[in-house]
Structures are given as C-alpha cells and as structure tokens.
Image (cartoon, coloured by chain):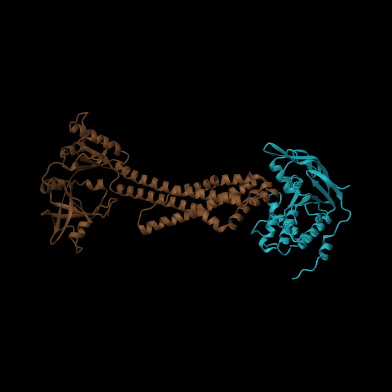
Chain colours: A brown, B cyan
Amino acid sequence: MRLLNLFKIATKAIILNKTRTLLTMLGIIIGVASVIAMLAIGEGSKESIRTTISAMGSNMITIQPGADSRGPARGSGGDVQTLTLANYETIKEQSNLISYITPVVNGSGQVINGSNNWPSSIYGVNPEYLDIKVVGLQSGSMFTEAEVKSASKVVVIGQTVVDNVFPDGQEAVGQMIRFNNIPFKVIGVLEEKGENTFGQDQDDVVIAPYTTVQKRILAIDHLNQIVASAISEDDAPDAVTQVSEILRSEHKLLDNEEDDFSVRSMEELISTFSSTSEMLTILLVAVASISLLIGGIGIMNIMYVSVKERTKEIGLRMAVGGKGSDILMQFLIEAILISITGGILGVLLGLGATVFIEKFLNWPTSVALYSIVISFAVCAVTGIFFGWYPARKASALDPITALRYE
Amino acid sequence: MSKEIIKIQDLKREFTMGTETVHALKGISFSIQEGEFVTIMGSSGSGKSTMLNILGCLDQPTSGVYEIDGVSMKDLSRNELATIRNEKIGFIFQSYNLLARTSAIENVELPLLYNSKVTTEERRERAIKALEMVGLGERLHHTPSQLSGGQQQRVAIARSLVNNPVMILADEATGNLDTRTSYEIMSLFQELNKKGITITFVTHEPDIATFSSRTVVLKDGEIMQDYKNHNIQSAAAELAKLPKQED
C-alpha cells in the first residue's frame, strides 16, 4: 500500500517533468539500443561465418605440403612436393577416424566451348570429394572410380562455368568443352553454392578425376592437397593428430624435425575467424557499454539536481509525516522508472536499428535474447546504483533545514 | 476540565556553535488545553522558531519534558517523530509550501499518502471534506498557480486538517498576505477553533494575537508573559470594517 503510494508520487514527478525525464532517458535509450545493435551485428557475423564454413564441410580436414604456413612467413607451401599419392593411400589405409578422403591437384586455365571461353580452376579429385565438400549435383552424375583409374576426360562443372561457356542456356551435360585445349565431356553440373564468406565464388570450378589432371594437364605426380573428412565433427581434432602421426612416420621425420606438411581441421578455421569477430564484438559492446554508463551518470546528475531543486518539497513531505525511507524510496523509484522506461525504449530502438542494418546495409544480424535480458538488467541496476546516492542524500536531509531552503 | 494536548516542563534547547553553546530555550514550562487558540509571540532571536520546531516534532529538546497528546517526545527516533507529525500535527507555513503543478486535492491528500491505514477512497473523501471546510469545494482541481495567495493558504489549511490532527501549528501563516486576506484567513482560523480545533499560531505580529484566546510571549529563550485574552477580536468583524475593495 505504502509502496504503491510512493510509486504514484514518483510517477507523478516524472510526468510533471516530461522533457527533462525524456532527455535523461535519452542516454539510457542510446546506450541500450547500441548494446543490442552491436551484439546483434557481432552475433550475426559470427553465425554467418560458422554457417559458411560448416557449409564447406564442418568435419573437413585439409592436409597441405610444407610446414604450417600460419604465423611468420615460411615460404609458400605451393612449391613443396612432399605430398604424394602414396601418402594418400597410407592415410586411407591406416586412419580409422576418417570417412572420406581424396587427393587434390589443382590448376587454372581456360574453359572453352566454341567461341565462349572462361578462365577457371580445375580440381583433380576422386568421387569422394563431393561427400567431403557436402555438395550435390543438380544434373548429370559424378565420375566413377573406374573413370579415375582410366584417367578419363570427363568433368563436372559449377554453375558459373555453365553460365559463361553455355550462355544460351543449353543443357551442359553431354556437351564437350576444352580445358587448356584438352577436350572433356561434361557429365554433371554441381549444385549452386554461391559466394562464401571470403567472397570466393564456389561455383566457378571444374572438377575432373585427379589422374586426368595430374597426367594430362599438370604433368606432375605429387599432390597439391589431400582433403578428408573426419567421421564426425567431434572426431576432427583427433583425426588431425592421427593423420599427422601417420604422415610423420611415412615421411620418416625425426622427433626434433618439424612437420613438412600441415593438417588443419575446419574447426580451427572456424575458431580463427570466430575469435576475430568475437574481438570485434567485444570492442563494439565495450564502446556501447560506455555510452550506457554515461547514460547512468546522466540519471545520477539529474536526480542530484532534482533533489537540490526539490529540497523544500522534501522538507514539506517530511513535515507532514514522510519518513527518511519514504523519501529514499520515492527518489529511487523515480530513478529506476526512468532507467527501465529508457531501457524498454532502448530495446525497441535497438531492435529497430537491427532490422534497419539487416535490410538496408545487408549486414548479417542476429538478436540474441540474452542481449535484451542483460541490457534490461543493466538498466535496472543502473537506476538503483546511480539513483541511490541522490536518494540517500534526500532522505538524510534535516526537515527543518529543508523547509527553510530557498 | 478539558484535555491537555501539550505539556511542556522545564524545556531547554541548546545548540553548539563551534566552541560556544547557545541557549535558545532556557527552561520553559506551559501547557495547551484542547480547544485553545494560542499565539506564541516574540521577536527574532526570542527562541520562537526553536519552540515551533520542537512543538512540531521536527526537533527534540536538549532536556525537559515535551508531551503531545500524552506521548512523550523523549528519545524518539526520526521515524517515530515522522509518524507523530503525520498523525497528530497539522502544519501551516508562511509560504504555503504547496506542491507546484499539483491540484489542490492532491496537495491536501499528501499527508494521508504517508499513512498506510488510509485507503485511496477514504483519502479522496477526506481531502474533499477538508477543502469544503476552508471554502474551496469548487476548486478541487486547480493548481497553486491558478489560485490566489489567500486561496493557496486555504489549501494549506485544508492539508493541515485532513489528518484530523490534535493541533494545528501555524508558522507566520499570514506573513505573505495583505491585510484583507490575513483577516480572511484569521477568521477562518477562528471558525475552525470554534469547531473545537486546537490552534497554535507562531507570529511576531501583535494584531494577530488579538484574535486568539491566549498569548505566550517569548524573549531571549524565556516566557515573558502568558495571558488569557478576555477581549477576543472577531476577524470577520475587522474584515467588515475595512474599506470596500475597488474591483
């Protein structure tokens, strides 16, 4: 009952000072809105990176020749010829944590169909490649193990290649194209995957048996990469270790020698990119939190002025029977009301800003429920924390002095 | 034999100002009976304000007895004093002290907001009744800025009545008003007093004292005079004697 009365008194005071209240709230509104929007941007980019990488095959493991090229430069791994077909076969035989594996050789060149030509990349792989990359065919079929053995001149191409060398919308499957002047029969077209997070067009590829690419196009017998997929995402880290060990013994490396290859799982890639975006999120939220803090200080400032300005009123309230605790509660409720109302408006504004960013700037966003809960809680705490000091000051006033205050 | 509302015995109040001790009240004794209209007179420095603060339970004596309605003030906490003020005293100030931009009825309701025993409906009812008593039944929803000085003081009087106090304590209640309006207010006080309400009026204006039933004169912290007024002037009659206002 008494709390309800105090609530009424506080609401009344807020309504009587509409403009001032609104200006005070503005700090909180902007603070909360920016925290929500920034978190939404951060979460959104993290999620989009994760989706893109997962779409590339989240349990994919990449084995590259040459030492780990992350960190300080150690020369390009491209020229190193430490991966061989024999390595591929040993891993395939010995590793029990791997479900699919394919050797990869790649090169670039010109795809030609009549008068249309298009620069693209060719990947020489085995049929398991599609399972590893988690990509299907929209038409035609994948080449077979037998076609790999016989180094057949067949290719599966991506949509971008189709669009560019078959501009009239002809059916690509069954047609002949030339890659670096060698004729290939198109036997399948890959599903469209679009661009990945790094802006690379995943449909601009030509896939052929690795034997064909090795012998007929590149004329090499080493491998550029071995790509495999772990039996599950959880097994990926163990698979990485296992494959490393197999390769170390295969390459007869001594204990004090560094790997002459590198094995990486997608998980590592995800964590690398996630941590970058996480850093960014933390930074954005830190900046936003500062504005929330300033909003809180704004409340304290206004409440402080308000207590000074209403000293006589406080004196009167005490004279007619208001206790110190009543006065304290009145001002505290006022501060909390301002900050919570500001919080609600801030959440709404933040959600609005998020929709705006998503729609007009095309940035991926994702509003996390926790960000709303947290900023709301922070608002309430801000109100209590910054309202406490002025409220305490008001309640400690001596009624006689307060009544005579001019 | 009427009831004793205020009982003061050998009341002292000292203030320490640095190393010096100021004796604001030097052992005062008097009592106020129910239904009395007492003026406490004195020039500045007489201890009048200190007396008022103690009577109003805003301050506590250094020593001596102060009882209001049978309750001793000795050793009461801040909160207990607040409750006594809320239930037993009605304050009226020189500068009205109404809440700005707040309607008359809400101003009058204020003391009852701090009394959790009073329901919302009862609060409203009592506020309307109090405003009707001071002749402002038609102006319940006017804010102070829409009321004249005299009307504002009437709202303040209504506010002091709303909690059915044992005593109304007025501090220079006519100090901000012109002669005509002061007489109007004094006549209202006399009316209320006739209805049995005990009034203590602190002032330094001698003509106000002529409207009361008893006068206590303070000087240098001691009672100089304490006399019953056998020739009480009627404020209403004085008002009628004033030259007509030119409208």
Residue A212 visible from this viewpoint = yes
Is B50 in front, or is A183?
B50
Residue A252 sits in quarter: top left
Is A314 in front, or is B149?
B149
Give the percent coordinates (x, y) of residue A133: 25, 47
Label tally: 0
Is B66 in front, or is A326?
B66
Is A311 in front, or is A81?
A311
Residue at the (64%, 47%) spot, across then down? A326
Q: Residue lying farthest top?
A: A255
Give the percent coordinates (x, y) of residue A348: 47, 55
Say whether residue A62 is left or right of residue B52.
left
Residue A1 visible from this viewpoint = no
**Above or below A116: residue A247:** above
Give the percent coordinates (x, y) of residue B97: 69, 55
Residue at the (23%, 57%) spot, across then down? A159
Say whether residue B58 is left or right of residue A202.
right
Give the percent coordinates (x, y) of residue B78: 69, 42
